[in-house]
Image (tube, rainbow, N blue to C red):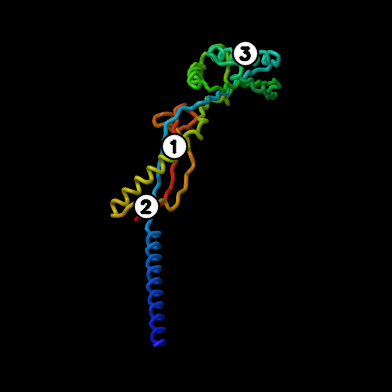
Amino acid sequence: MTDARTTLVAALILAAGLLGGGWLLGDGLTRAKHADRAVTVRGLAERDVTADLATWTIASAAVGSDLPMLQAKADSDGDRVIAFLQARGFGTDEIEAGGISVNQYVDSNGRPNITIRRKIQLRTTKVMAARAAYARQAELMRQGVVFDSDNGGMIYSFTRLNSVKPPMIAAATKNAREGAEQFAKDSGARVGDIKSASQGYFSIIPRDGDASGASAGASPFQKVRVVTTIDFYLD
């Protein structure tokens, strides 16, 4: 009797083990199957922004053979540029006098050829005022200022990128989920949790219709863009 009872208990234990193992195996297969069902989508977020910093390097050149006369010309050109900027509301803290360079060589006739270059830089947060001044730079030419061949144009910069990053990442994630939901709807599934995600780099490009084919810095009207890549589980 004792042997029969022992055999029955052993059989029950074995059956319970088999049932438990089968359940664990089935649950593991279900979870593995769930892990295999995923969709990779990209989410895009864009935001129109306006540059908050303008930098304009104005380079003038005085060319001739009389050094003292050229030095006086370079000084007067620099004074005219500074006066031009101050007349448009820019303060001394926004205007910086750059360096002066002198190049000299003797031509085949033994005559000296001298070029004196001088740079004045405007760096201001008054972006639209700087844009208006840049549009009137021909006034300096009418005053006799000769721009150097490497005269820098206006560069517009958006410096508040960190302030728009969090909401743009959220918008890109939402956009990615919408794409995954459409995919899931078409395939008869349901979007689950995020399996993995990677954030692309933020880029600043020209806004549509502005400075086409040029860098973003050529216009104060710019666009910030970010693309995220996200894997979603499908249930």
In this rendering, the answer to whether 22 lies above or below 224 is: below
Please tell me whether mark 1 sits on a helix, a strand or a loop: helix
Disc 1/disc 3 C-alpha distance (Å): 46 Å
Q: In terms of image quadrants, where is residue 49? A: top left
> Residue 167 bears which disc, if any?
1
Going by the numbered disc 1, the residue's amino acid type is: Pro
Question: What percent of the width, then of the height, locates residue 234?
Answer: 35, 55
In this rendering, the answer to whether 175 lies above or below 105 is: below
Left or right: where 221 falls relative to 185 = right
Query: In terms of sequence position, does the residue under pointer 1 or pointer 3 come before the other?
Result: 3
Q: Residue at x 51, y 35 (%)?
A: 162
Towards the viewer: 97 or 63: 97
Query: In terms of sequence position, does the residue under pointer 2 or pointer 1 come before the other?
Result: 1
Question: What percent of the width, then of the height, locates residue 148?
Answer: 59, 22
Going by the numbered disc 3, the residue's amino acid type is: Asp
Quarter of the figure that contains the N terminus = bottom left
